[in-house]
Each structure stands twice: as C-alpha cells, then as structure tokens.
Image (tube, coloured by chain):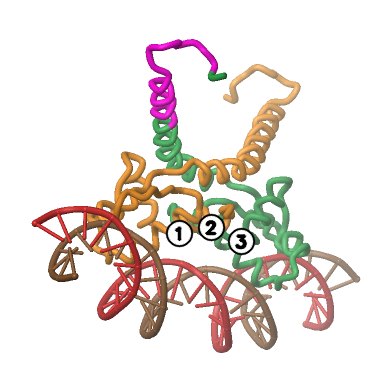
Chain colours: A orange, B green, C red, D brown
Amino acid sequence: MIPTLDATFAALADPTRRALLARLAREEATVMELAQPFSMSQPAISRHLKVLEEAGLILRRVDGTRRPCRLAPGGVAAIDQWLDMLRQALARNYDRLDQVLAEMTPTTNPKRKSP
Amino acid sequence: MIPTLDATFAALADPTRRALLARLAREEATVMELAQPFSMSQPAISRHLKVLEEAGLILRRVDGTRRPCRLAPGGVAAIDQWLDMLRQALARNYDRLDQVLAEMTPTTNPKRKSP
DNA sequence: CCGTTATATAACATATAGATTGTATAACAG
DNA sequence: CTGTTATACAATCTATATGTTATATAACGG
C-alpha cells in the first residue's frame, strides 16, 4: 500500500510520533523499548507505530515475538518531493525581492549604499 | 505567535490546504480567487487560510477589503530543519548498508561484477 | 447614505484522532 | 504443557477538525 501525503504529514503532526522517530533516528528499537520513556499505554504506542508505518516513515521486521522498528526512507522522500514546489516558489519570490531592491536604487548612483 | 511543528505538519496534512499552497506557489491571490476552484463555501476556505497562516506557511496583506495571500518561508524552513534529523539518520543507515554490501564481497575477487 | 463585494466569525453537525482498559495471539522459558 | 513476555486488536470515551448556514464587519462604487 502506497502511503499518501495526507497520511505522512498527519503522522508527523503528532509530537509523540515525532519523538518516536527521533528515537529511531538513533537506532532500531522494539515496541517496548520505544514505549518505555512515555507515560502512555503500550497499545497507544502500538497504534502510533502503525500510523508511522502506514505513512512510509518506519519499517518493522519480525524477530521472534518482537517487532523491531527502524526508519524508512519513503515517507521523507515523498514529503521532500512535494515541498520542492514550495521551496522553488519561495526561492523565486526571494529572487524577485532581490530584483525589486536592486531597482529601488535606480539610475542614479547604481552602486551606492543608501545613506 | 511562533508556529509549532504540530501546527505546520497538521496544516500540510489536508489536501485542500496543499492545493491552496500549490495555487499560491504560482502567484499571490485573494481569498475569493483561492476559493473559486473549490466546491466549498467561502468560510471554509477562510478557515483553511487561517490554519495556513498560523502554521507559518502563508502571509496576508491588507488591500482595501481584500486580503491577498502569499507563501511564507517560515513554515517550510521549520519543517526542513526538523526533517534534517531524519535525513541524516537515513543517510547513515544507507552508508551502513553500503558497508555491509561491500563486506559481502569478501577477500575473493574484490573488483568483480556478479555474473 | 446605500447597496454590493470581500472577508471573518458564530453556531452547529458529524467524523475522526488519540487515549484507555480489557483481551487475544504467539513466541519463549522452564 | 504452562506461565510470562511482546505485541496487536476491540470497544469505548472525549476532544478536535472540518464542513455548513447565517450573520457581522468593513471597504467600495455611485
């Protein structure tokens, strides 16, 4: 199942889930290891992990009775791709601002600082 | 008011709001101009724009009775900064994978393709 | 002034998210 | 087998998000 941008952004909107990702940025961890620092029930963490998985942000392997999680590249890549549109638009705006500022020092004294 | 990561990611999680941003990536636009392509009431668009503003994703100026909106750099910047943690961790994982693969072609024939 | 246009706010309905407790499943340890 | 450990699932509660309609505000055009 392909994760949607909706799912990926929504997954990142929750502070608990961002904390889980920050933990996983250090190293792979099991559900119990991930749950331990939080004052929250284990099922709650399990659901957060499911959300992260469906968002393409983590992967889980099976190791006996454990399900170690690690970061997945897909989610971040999808987001980055979408954000590029905004980044480019913002860069264009910035360039335009540069141009406007340049034109504000008109024909008179083209290379002078304001005072 | 400083936008939180919660607010910014949540703002991006909605497809209507992403469409509004995509529109604004082209050019500044008023509320009515933004609302026009959607089969949605004007108040609904107004609220979406408020969410985007509070997320640091857009800015609004006052022009008579109009409130033209344009993209703001803050939101994307905040997100990028946070995502860097994940990007770096993913890059480290990738390097580690490279290393593992390299070690899987041991002392015998170090520079040969698989055939 | 007055009607119109642009936008925001209020009140409300409904759906969804996130948490909890209780329980099911399934591997492991003895 | 049996008890324990690791994890997932179900039922349930509550809060919040998102949409609607109705209405307020405020600038504009004549």
Q: Are marks 1 and 3 on the same chain?
A: no
Residue C9 or A21: which is nearer the viewer? A21
* Residue B42 drawn above or below residue B81: below
Image disc number at residue A7: 2
Q: Are marks 2 and 1 on the same chain?
A: yes
Tag 1: residue type?
Val
**Subunit under mark 1:** A
Tag 3: residue type?
Leu
> For mark 1, what is the residue?
A51
Residue B55 or A79: which is nearer the viewer? A79
Q: Residue at x 68, y 27 (%)?
A: A102
Q: Residues within 10 Å of mark 2 (few under 14, many from 20)?
A: many
Percent x, y for residue B33? 76, 60
- Find numbered disc 1 in the image and state the secondary structure of the residue it sits on: helix
Q: Residue at x 43, y 48 (%)?
A: A58
**Subunit under mark 3:** B
Q: Quadrant of residue A48?
A: bottom left
Q: Quadrant of residue A47?
A: bottom left
Q: Residues within 10 Å of mark 3 (few under 14, many from 20)?
A: many
Left or right of residue A22: residue A53? right
Percent x, y for residue B89? 39, 36
Tag 2: residue type?
Ala
> For mark 3, what is the residue?
B49
Left or right of residue B78: residue A63? left
What segment carries the magenta color?
A: B94-113
Q: Are marks 3 and 2 in contact (CB under 8 Å)?
A: no
- Find numbered disc 3 in the image and state the secondary structure of the residue it sits on: helix
Q: Are marks 1 and 3 in contact (CB under 8 Å)?
A: no
Disc nearer the start of the sequence (2/1): 2
- Residue B100 within the segment the image draws in magenta: yes
Q: Residue at x 73, y 64 (%)?
A: B35
Q: Quadrant of residue D18?
A: bottom right
